[in-house]
Amino acid sequence: MKVFVTGVSGQLGHDVMNELAKRGYEGIGSDIQPTYGGAQDGTAVTTMPYVRLDITDAEVVRKTLTDLRPDVIVHCAAWTAVDMAEDDDLVPKVKAVNVGGTRNIADAAKALDAKMVYISTDYVFNGQGSEPWDPDCRDFAPLNVYGETKLGGEEAVSGTLDKYFIVRIAWVFGVNGRNFIKTMLKVGRTHDEVRVVNDQIGTPTYTYDLARLLVDMIETDRYGYYHATNEGGYISWYDFTKEIYRQAGLSTKVTPVTTEEYGLSKAARPFNSRLDKSKLVKNGFQPLPDWKDALTRYLEILKKNENDQ
């Protein structure tokens, strides 16, 4: 099986390439950068080819994928800077990447009759209430430009293909890139106290675990919409921070605040990021491990990398 992966310079794309390598599949990575240097921890995938690709260029996407002829495309590339996406000057670029770029990939997948995985987000919903969102729910009402464009990407995929997996995730962390955990560790080591919102509820997603699930998926034809975060129940960002500091051995005081009190975000954030993941088990997929276990494994890797530097 030949698999083309977009966005390999990001957290998830890198881990997907590593998972493909573990299973002996032929993986081809791509991103906008001229070259790919691997993760910041030095775990670069050196055994697989890399292709520079601007997904917003339809003709280049068509030609590249026609030449490579992958059996599967795992589309991890996206504009993910949520607050920056609200800048009026940047909205066209965000749409070009998240909607237009995804449509270009989907069109190429259709021409090749290839399977496609599209990574989406809980931000496609309105973020209200307390019930977990069902993956087949169509009650969409994105709160911000990022959510609107990711929904547009979903529609481009589902409106073009039959052989697709649309996988919504939330609160992502991985080794390759920046994330909430790395930020909290840095702040916790330099401040006596941090303020963290306590009224946004969801579950973290470790890209290492998610990559395993995605490769499990492409080995099947159980297409459709899925939700995938780590198990272990629903928590707030405050709860998450408390556990990060507990496991990291930091004594930094964590003070809970409301989203309104925090008040630093340009884009509106969902209060309810609970995702119902039961469809995974119903369709024969193994859920992701408990988020506390994922955090433990992740912190061990970060510590090892720090010691190796």
Image (cartoon, helix red, strand yellow):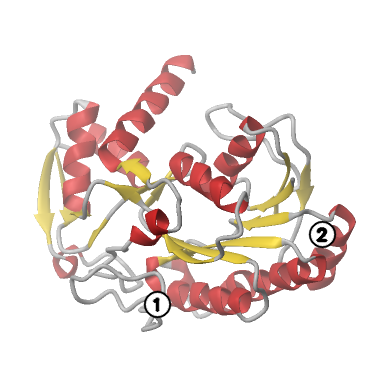
Decide: is 40 above or below 281: above
Label 2: state its secondary structure: helix
Q: Quadrant of residue 257?
A: bottom left
Q: CA distance from mark 2 to mark 1?
A: 32 Å
Question: Which quarter shows the N terminus?
Answer: top right
Q: Nearer the viewer, residue 152 or 136?
A: 136
- Mark 2 residue crowding within 10 angstroms, few (<14) / some (14–19) / many (20+): some
Give left or right: position of 250 versus 255.
Answer: right
Q: Quadrant of residue 99?
A: bottom right
Residue 144 is tagged as 1
Point 45% across, 63% down: residue: 226
Please tell me whether mark 2 or mark 1 is closer to you in this view: 2
Residue 112 placed where, x, y %?
81, 65
Can you identify the residue that label 2 sits on?
65
Point 15% across, 58% down: residue: 198
Point 49% across, 76% down: residue: 151
Q: Quadrant of residue 56?
A: bottom right
- Mark 1 residue crowding within 10 angstroms, few (<14) / some (14–19) / many (20+): many
